[in-house]
Amino acid sequence: METVLQLVQVIAMASLAVLCIYLIIVLSSLRRDLADFAQRSKPVLENLAFITEKLKSTAQKIDEHVDIVKSSLTSFKSVADNVLLLEERVQQRIEEPIIQVASIIGTIVSSVGIFFERFRSRD
C-alpha cells in the first residue's frame, strides 16, 4: 500500500509540474497578446482622444452660436416690443383727430347733400 501511495504522490507531483508548465506557457502567451493589444490599441486611443477633443470644441462652438441666436432673438423681441409701443402711441395720438376729421367731413357731405335736396325741391 505504501508503494501505491508513493506512486500516487509521484503522479500528483508530475501532474502538478505539468500544470505549472502549462500555466507558464498560457501566461506567456497571454502576456504577448496583452502587449500586442496595448500596441495596437494605442493609436485607437489617440484617435479617440483627438475625436473627443474635436467634439468638445464643436460643442463649445454650438453653445456660442446658440448664445448668439438667443441674444439676437432677445434683441428682435425688444425691437418688436418697441414697434408695438410706437404703434399704440401713434394710434392714441392720431386716432381721435382722424375720427373727428371723418366726422366733420361726414357732416359737411351730409349738409351739402341736404342743401342740394332743398335747392332741388325749390325748383
Image (cartoon, helix red, strand yellow):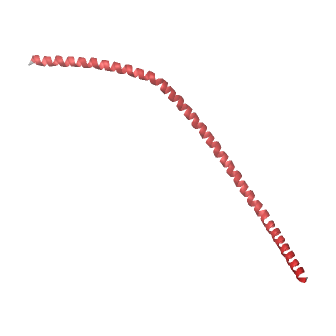
For residue 117, side relative to residue 68 (left or right): right
Q: Is residue 76 above or below residue 110?
A: above
Tell me the residue at 14%/17% (across/down): 7
Between 69 and 108, the residue placed more toward the observer is: 108
As drawn, which residue projects farthest toward the left? 1
Tell me the residue at 23%/19% (across/down): 16
For residue 51, side relative to residue 36 (left or right): right
Q: How many marks?
A: 0
Tell me the residue at 63%/43% (across/down): 67
Q: Position of residue 70 (x, y in %)?
A: 63, 46
Which quadrant of the rendered structure holds the C terminus? bottom right
Q: Quadrant of residue 54?
A: top right
Q: Quadrant of residue 87?
A: bottom right
Q: Position of residue 113 (x, y in %)?
A: 85, 76
Q: Is residue 46 above or below residue 55?
A: above
Q: Is residue 22 above or below residue 73?
A: above
As drawn, which residue projects farthest toward the bottom? 122
Which quadrant of the rendered structure holds the N terminus? top left
Q: Position of residue 22 (x, y in %)?
A: 28, 19
For residue 86, side relative to residue 10 (left or right): right
Q: Position of residue 49 (x, y in %)?
A: 51, 29
Tell me the residue at 73%/55% (across/down): 83
Q: Quadrant of residue 10?
A: top left
